[in-house]
Amino acid sequence: MRGYRVALLVLMLLPGMVMAQYWFQTGARGGQSSAFNSGARITIQTITGQSVSDGSIAFWVGETLQNGAFIQVGYLVPNQSGQYSSQCTASGCGQSQYLSKGAPEWFYEYFNPGNDSQFMGSVGTNDSAGLNSTFHTYGFYSTGDTWYLTMDNKTLGSINLRTTGSGQNGAVAFVEAANVSSDSGVIKPVIFSNLSIYRNGTWIAAPYGYAYSGYGVGSLSALPNPYGVEEIGNRADYFAAGSGLPTPNSGELLWQLGYDLNIISRYGNLSGTTPFIAYKTAPIQAPSQISIGNGTRAEFRGWSGYGISAYTGPAAAANVTLFGNVTEIANWQVQYLIDVLSGVGNTTGSGWYAANSSVRYFVNSNVVYAGASHRWVFENWSDGSANRSSVLVASGHRSVTANWQDQYLVNASSMYGSVHGGGWYANGSTARIGINGTYHQINATTRLAFFSWSDGQSSPNLTVKVTGPLDLGSVFRQQSLERIMGTDNIGAPINVTAFYAGNQSLGNSTFLFDGKVYGISAAYYKGTMLYVNRNISVSSPGTAYVSLPVYDLNIRTSDVFGIPVNASLELVFLNGTSRTLYSGSQGAITLQNVPYGAATIAADYAGETMDTSIRQSSGVRISFISVFDMEVFAAIALAGIVSYLLIARRLSHGIR
């Protein structure tokens, strides 16, 4: 390291002074980690009242450049008052100024490449290094070959040293007792902090600091260096140098500068702080997605970096060179799984969506066919929406299911008439199918009429529960006009209101299917349903005779001697009707074709009432006791009494 040369000028300006031989230097070296820079700086505490027996005390930062030039800047404390050269260049020292003993002044000095003997530089005025215990930052940096020397970011001067950097040489920060003749001088400890280098346009702290205790270039070395250096308060890049401090071996590590990489992430257990050696490259990495559970995840959206050379960008994996403490915040987008479900067909909309975003979902078709006669028709969504396309807000894990109506095709057809009720029906619903126009007339006595459906059902109007596809065709058959005639018990025709085959009313003249056997079960006659058992079959137009259970009622009214009497008769028939008749002088009434020949009779003659009934009998006789009968009975009774008295008298007189 170059020795400090300011004291040589002082000696030249102060006659009688003897040039000393020692340049004691103590402090810190940045080492190879601070090499290849374009400048250096450090903050140095100004301590006044420094005193050595001869020479001067200086506190500075400097380094040898890659072409052999040397540069340093800091402050000095002269041990004597007097005139000092204030500006020296390659042409010599021109200006001078008065400096007071113990007053601190800034200074800088440099040596051109290959010239270790010619001092060049400048010295500031009295107390230009500031008040006692204040801190000031001294440094130098290059712009091209020009090097600028600064104090507290103010330029003190500039020089062309014909190089742009330090090469493999690193920066140093020393306290130096220059041009002293002994090791008895006391240097009050001075604090140094923030040894930094200028690299790529940025000031960065020296990552390592190594202790140095030795001598300047050309110095005698017979006396041990009495000054020491130590790190203060376990703070990196913060140390003191001077008397009364430990004297570590040169090259011993004073500090190792480290920076913290602080990762902040709400998800993925990525958060934490990791220390790294300064300027090391530290990896940061996050997964593309993190499952939070219950259909929720966080998707990585990039880093937001804070600090020198921090990374900000979308890449999940990146490298950060730590030129200082760096905080990297992982940015996440919370997403929710939206399930758009359907048992049939296809849906659109399932997937992951950002929280509170709008999700449009829909079924791709309103109708899905399973075949020609089976389909599903979209009905609604499980969230209540009835539209094929709908929107929801992704406020959490959501599932919506398309509800479909299962439908079957009901097909009904006919060659005659018009069919109604065909179409698509929901499974389990009721279809009502019918034919308008159930016959096709051929002539007055012959026609084609609906006979049945292809599934065998005979009613032209059907109510069917739909549980599957249904294909119905009508069957028409020929009918002939048939007259149905009722007859009484002797075969005489009677006029019947209607005939019945089961529950079917046939009428007296009706079209019946050829070849079909009709079981005539009843006839409606005189308000009474007459039950019969007669089968008829039709092959052509004609007449069918049906014998009915009807009978003539013959009623006779007379006295006990058979003499006709004119009685009043109240008849009640099976159909609930009644009729009042008189038997007349002949005492006889005949009623023809009475259903079942049944009636109840209440007969009245001369105040005498007789009740009776009749059913399928040839006749009924009702006898009354007339006035004549009573007279006859009275005469007979009187004759008997007279006869009795006569017999009794004779007996009483002994007549036998």
Image (spheres, rainbow, N blue to C red):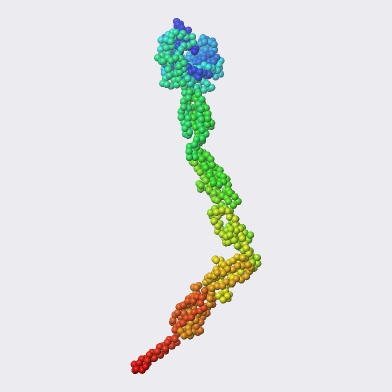
> In the figure, 614 relative to 222: above or below?
below
Residue 271 % position (x, y): 46, 31
Is residue 581 among what the camera can see?
no
Residue 471 found in image quarter: bottom right
**At 58% from the left edge and 61% from the top edge, which residue is drawn?**
458
> In the figure, 482 relative to 469: above or below?
below
Residue 535 % position (x, y): 58, 68
- Find the residue positioned furthest to the top: 16
Residue 463 found in image quarter: bottom right
**At 56% from the left edge and 44% from the top edge, which residue is drawn?**
347
**At 49% from the left edge and 9% from the top edge, which residue is drawn?**
218
For the residue pair 229 and 510, the one nearer the viewer reads as: 510
Residue 178 % position (x, y): 45, 11
For the residue pair 315 and 369, the one nearer the viewer reads as: 369
For the residue pair 653 and 139, the one nearer the viewer reads as: 653
- Tag count: 0
Q: Quadrant of the C terminus?
A: bottom left
Is residue 624 among what the camera can see?
yes
- Find the residue positioned furthest to the right: 443
Residue 603 % position (x, y): 46, 79
Is 100 left, or right, of 166 in this rendering?
left
